[in-house]
Image (spheres, rainbow, N blue to C red):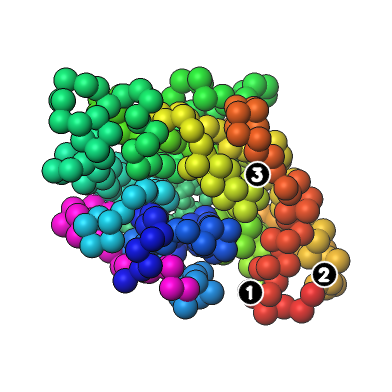
């Protein structure tokens, strides 16, 4: 059991890419939090990602499903959970096209189960936070000043809920949702569930919608690891369609710092977009990585010769780009990495992983 003077946060899905970067960052920065990590260890999660945290007395891993209500109720009462940061999801668009059902189950039902248990535990049990702050007068709404004194539920979401952009314009927090893939539709639904628990029950929620992350520990199936791995093996490097789809790339630790700021921010019910202002086409990404590999692991001819265009993803969104002004102005966030510094760190990390000398 943890040191009881610390606050204990339930983090979900932290054996995956972003969560496994977040946990060591957060444990090192704050000594006054314990973290319970609930992760099902699907194909996308690996405890190897968290090796450095295993021995930390303020960290506990539990293998389990966010759809398992009994387990979540047990975790809330056993550990006295006082906050949630919810990363767990099915996250790969291609998989959602092949098999949408598991995205509906995990991303929608899982988020519902988690926030509903949090609501019941924090706001409905005898001696709830609501009563502690407002007394037993049930006519008093919990909404308002008191809200932010309640434990916080932070939902991690994506810019993909906004759909696709033309050549110009940026997604702001006011952009209407227009999800185009089963993945983004399931994330949009989960955002709405979280929003509804704030508006209906006065829960202290926040949502962050971020752009494409890159950096260490990303699963092999995603674009940047796929490029590096295939290049090193001398295999064709597959690029969808004409390679001109644009994403706004965010270094994963900059995302973690944004989550930290939003989790600790004052206003409840808010949404913040997090993006690195690093728009690149997939062709620019593969081109830059191949140039770096040409320098670091030279071979006869350039790695660029391996680039192969393959049939486009069904319903492939053309362009995503985030306006992070709200996060920058209200909470003072800025990215530490630009794309150039971030991609060098990333390529070096994967070269180590794939055991190649620099
Ligand atoms: N990676 C990105 O570029 C990106 C961009 C925007 C938003 N997001 C969001 O950030 C969050 C984390 O993304 P990621 O890239 O780290 O994902 P990931 O796929 O790398 O990791 C997901 C983790 O969730 C776990 N998980 C899956 N189903 C579960 C279940 N039913 N119960 C418990 N755990 C389960 C997996 O085992 C895995 O460890 C997701 O909510 C995703 O939608 C990611």
Q: Is residue 241 left or right of residue 63?
A: right
Report whether residue 99 is seen: no
Q: Which numbered disc, 3 or 2, marks the residue closer to the eye?
A: 3
Ligand 1 within 8 A of label 2's CB? no
Residue 12 appears in which quarter of the rendering?
bottom left
Element marked by disc 1:
helix
Instruction: State which region is magenta.
Output: 56-75
CA separation in Å, label 3 and label 2 = 22 Å
Please state the horizontal and vertical placement of residue 254, each as a whole percent of the image: 64, 48
Q: Is residue 18 above or below residue 170?
A: below
- Kindly identify which residue carries mark 1: 353
Mark sitting earlier along the chain (3/2): 3
Question: In this orientation, which residue lies closer to the viewer: 88 or 145?
Answer: 145
- Kindly identify which residue carries mark 2: 296
Ligand 1 within 8 A of label 1's CB? no
Mark sitting earlier along the chain (1/2): 2
Element marked by disc 2:
helix
Q: Residue at x 13, y 43 (%)?
A: 126
Q: Is residue 163 left or right of residue 243?
A: left
Q: Is residue 266 left or right of residue 123?
A: right
Q: Is residue 307 above or below residue 278?
A: below
CA separation in Å, label 1 and label 2 = 14 Å
Element marked by disc 3:
loop
Q: Is residue 114 left or right of residue 219?
A: left
In the rendered view of the protein, which quadrant contains the C terminus? bottom right
- Kindly identify which residue carries mark 3: 249
Please state the horizontal and vertical placement of residue 174, each as a whole percent of the image: 50, 20
Q: Is residue 337 above or below residue 171?
A: below
Mark sitting earlier along the chain (3/1): 3
Report whether residue 352 is seen: yes
Please state the horizontal and vertical placement of residue 156, each as a whole percent of the image: 45, 43
């Amino acid at each position: 059991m943890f040191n009881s003077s610390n606050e204990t946060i339930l983090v979900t899905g932290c054996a995956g890419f972003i969560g496994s970067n977040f946990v060591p960052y957060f444990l090192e920065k704050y000594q006054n939090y314990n973290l319970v990590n609930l992760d099902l260890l699907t194909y996308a999660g690996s405890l190897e990602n968290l090796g450095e945290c295993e021995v930390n007395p303020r960290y506990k891993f539990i293998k389990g499903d966010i759809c398992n209500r009994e387990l979540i109720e047990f975790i809330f009462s056993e550990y006295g959970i006082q906050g949630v940061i919810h990363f767990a999801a099915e996250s790969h668009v291609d998989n959602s096209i092949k098999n949408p059902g598991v995205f509906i189950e995990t991303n929608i039902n899982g988020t519902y189960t988690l926030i509903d248990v949090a609501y019941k535990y924090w706001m409905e049990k005898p001696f709830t936070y609501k009563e502690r702050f407002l007394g037993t007068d049930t006519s008093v709404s919990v909404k308002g000043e008191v809200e932010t004194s309640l434990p916080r539920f932070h939902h991690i979401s994506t810019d993909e809920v906004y759909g696709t952009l033309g050549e110009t314009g940026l997604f702001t927090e006011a952009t209407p949702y227009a999800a185009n893939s089963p993945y983004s539709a399931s994330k949009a639904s989960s955002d709405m569930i979280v929003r509804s628990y704030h508006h209906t029950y006065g829960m202290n929620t926040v949502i962050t919608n971020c752009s494409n992350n890159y950096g260490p520990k990303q699963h092999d199936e995603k674009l940047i690891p796929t490029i590096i791995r295939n290049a090193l093996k001398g295999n064709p490097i597959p690029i969808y369609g004409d390679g001109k789809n644009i994403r706004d790339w965010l270094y994963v630790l900059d995302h973690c710092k944004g989550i930290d700021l939003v989790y600790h921010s004052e206003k409840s019910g808010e949404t913040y977009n997090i993006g690195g202002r690093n728009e690149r086409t997939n062709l620019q990404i593969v081109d830059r990585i191949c140039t770096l590999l040409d320098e670091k692991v030279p071979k006869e001819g350039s790695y660029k010769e391996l680039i192969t265009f393959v049939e486009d993803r069904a319903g492939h969104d053309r362009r995503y780009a985030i306006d992070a002004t709200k996060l920058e102005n209200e909470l003072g966030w800025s990215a530490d990495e630009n794309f150039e510094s971030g991609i060098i760190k990333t390529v070096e990390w994967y070269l180590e992983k794939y055991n190649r000398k620099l």
